[in-house]
Image (cartoon, coloured by chain):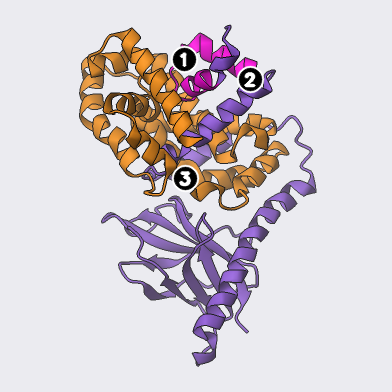
Chain colours: A purple, B orange
Amino acid sequence: MTFDRNEIAGIADEHVLGLLEPAEAAEIEAEMERDAELKAAIAASRDRFLPLDAGVEPATVDETLWRKIEAALPAQQAAALLPSANDNLKDGWRLTALSALAATLLLAIGLGWSLMRVVEPVVIAVLINDAGEAQAVVEDFGNETATVRLLRDFDVPADKTIQVWTLPSREMGPMSLGLVDKVRSVRLHGPTLPAPRSEQLYEITLEQQGGSPTGRPTGPILAKGFAKPAH
Amino acid sequence: MLMSSRPDELDVALTACASGDRAALRLIFDREAGRLVAIAERIVRRRELAEEVVQEAFIRIWTHAHQYAPERGSARGWIYAIVRNRAINMLRDGRREHTVEEVETLRETEQADEIMAAWHRLDRESRLRDCLGALDETKRHGILMAYVGGYSHGEIAGRLRIPLGTAKSWIRRGLSALRECMA
């Protein structure tokens, strides 16, 4: 496919919108590997239109879809399973944890919270959203009891509920602490779990009413954060 | 904008996928699968086909993760583009098992609403929302029908009752005005 250099931005947009004929689209995909300007134009166009997709109401997805994907995954060609792979992931989480830490400090200072408590939680996690805004606070008392306080009103459809999760360890996987129904603050009585640790992951997801049918998070993550020792 | 306000953990997850870490793919799934199914469904119109699209897309994300680099735009945009391409290919291959009438009914009734909803749901502060709003209605509608609903030039011309050549040039001019507005 030949095109005028002046038309690169236009072609990129039409490609991103899915308006090119399949053969043209395939050529553009191949061409962008050689043509940095075209590649940049496509990248810019994707990100320009992305908000139209990012704002979509998420579908409820269950565990079977993941199982189908996992069953079909080929081994990576470069599957050296470098230890750095996991470290990279942890780095991403560490960033989340750092923002959560900042939010924790702000809250602790601003509200003088833990000072007013009779029974102290073992850990506190401030859950933040993708934009880094604090959305909820979980206090885990470590005796099968945790409290969660939502810091804003979530738009929860009638057939959905907010579920609270924690990840005591990679081996255990995410464990449900309970549901938050139509209230902003609730005391949860969860299963018996190992004592909560510093840096333990907590998150809230949107699940179908009655909670996730699989016992694992299936809905979109509303917010997450890492625990800090409460004292 | 929401997605560019902090270092993107999807970016890190793709790197981890490339070196064989399945937990990283799972992280992408947990964060994005709900939205990706909904996006595919807006295009292919049926839930089970949308799941098929997302399933194939995740395999491709896994096998092509090593190709992702920041000069390809945001990690999220890269991931979403894979799903969009799969959905549009499925649509153009005619793999939807609907009769023509069924498709017409499904598309016309629900999809018109969804297409406009995608625009209305944009953040009020969003440049894209303002710039789409500044276009005249036919151009805006054509662009949204293509992006959100996966309509082809021919389908857009038919729905908007304008000749094919006119639809193509209006969309092209609309896209150009949009780029200028957002620059």
Q: Is residue A141 shown to the viewer in this render?
A: no
Labels 1, 3: front one: 1
Label 1, label 2: how far apart the Cα atoms are: 15 Å
Horizontal side of B139 relative to A73 (left or right) equals left
Horizontal side of B155 relative to A136 (left or right) equals left
Query: Is the magenta region chiefly helix, strand or loop?
Result: helix
Question: Which amino acid, mark 3?
Answer: Glu
Question: Which amino acid, mark 2?
Answer: Met
Horizontal side of A59 relative to B117 (left or right) equals right
Q: Horizontal and vertical percent for residue A161?
A: 34, 59
Question: Which amino acid, mark 1?
Answer: Leu
Instruction: From this view, report whether residue A120 is shown above or below residue A68.
Output: below
Mark 2, other Cα within 10 Å: few <14 / some 14–19 / many ≥20:
some
Give the image quarter of residue B78: top right
Residue bearing mark 2: A32
Mark 3, other Cα within 10 Å: few <14 / some 14–19 / many ≥20:
some
